[in-house]
Image (spheres, rainbow, N blue to C red):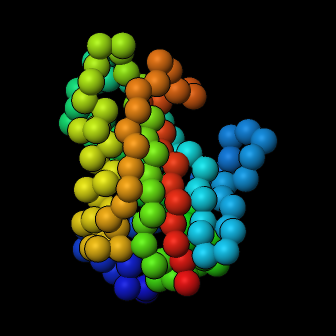
Amino acid sequence: MSVIETRLAELGVTLPDAPAPAANYVPFVQTGHLVHVSGQISANADGMIKGKLGADMDIEAGATAARACAVSLLAQLKAACGGDIDRLVRVVKLVGFVNSTSDFGDQPKVINGASDFMVAALGDKGRHARSAVSAASLPFGVAVEIEGIFEIA
């Protein structure tokens, strides 16, 4: 088991198989040492995590949805690395979209679910630049979608 996967296991996380794209795009693109991972929607073993922040979902549930996106991002990264996720040098940037009402303003607190997870799982390699923005709706009614850029060796 890799160093990163050992740390994930300590956190109670096993990376799932990388989710397949839901439309006409690829799950990731590598250019040089950067891997751009397409947006990962909030989902877990029970299915999609749906909801609208500020209406039928609170910040804690939104942060849990964002954490699920982060797990999927790492699953895609592992696939991009040919199964060797220890090739990760660092998380460069996350861009998080939060399905929220027009008056909801705590998108950063929601996306902290992903950011906090990356740092807990990866240490300093998990520290990253970030954007956290509102979306009037997201695919399938999910609560959160996050894309990422990663540097690999």
Quarter placement of the N terminus: bottom left
Q: Nearer the viewer, residue 148 or 130?
A: 130
Q: Classify 28 as above or below 48.
A: below
Kindly indicate the quadrant of the structure image that contains residue 55: top left
Pinpoint residue 81: horizontal percent, then vertical percent.
60, 76
Kindly indicate the quadrant of the structure image that contains residue 34: bottom right
Q: Classify 38 as above or below 56.
A: below
Kindly indicate the quadrant of the structure image that contains residue 49: top left
In the image, what residue occupies the spot 37% across and 21% down? 100
Left or right, 89 with respect to 36, comes to left
Left or right, 25 with respect to 115, comes to right
Residue closest to the far right: 24
Residue 68, can we see it? Answer: no
Q: Classify 20 as above or below 59.
A: below
Pinpoint residue 63: horizontal percent, then vertical percent.
28, 41
Residue 32, can we see it? Answer: yes
Q: Classify 62 as above or below 14.
A: above
In the image, what residue occupies the spot 51% across and 66% down? 150
Q: How many marks?
A: 0
In the image, what residue occupies the spot 68% across and 40% down? 22
Pinpoint residue 146: horizontal percent, then vertical percent.
47, 45
Quarter placement of the C terminus: bottom right
Left or right, 18 with respect to 124, comes to right
Pinpoint residue 86: horizontal percent, then vertical percent.
47, 83
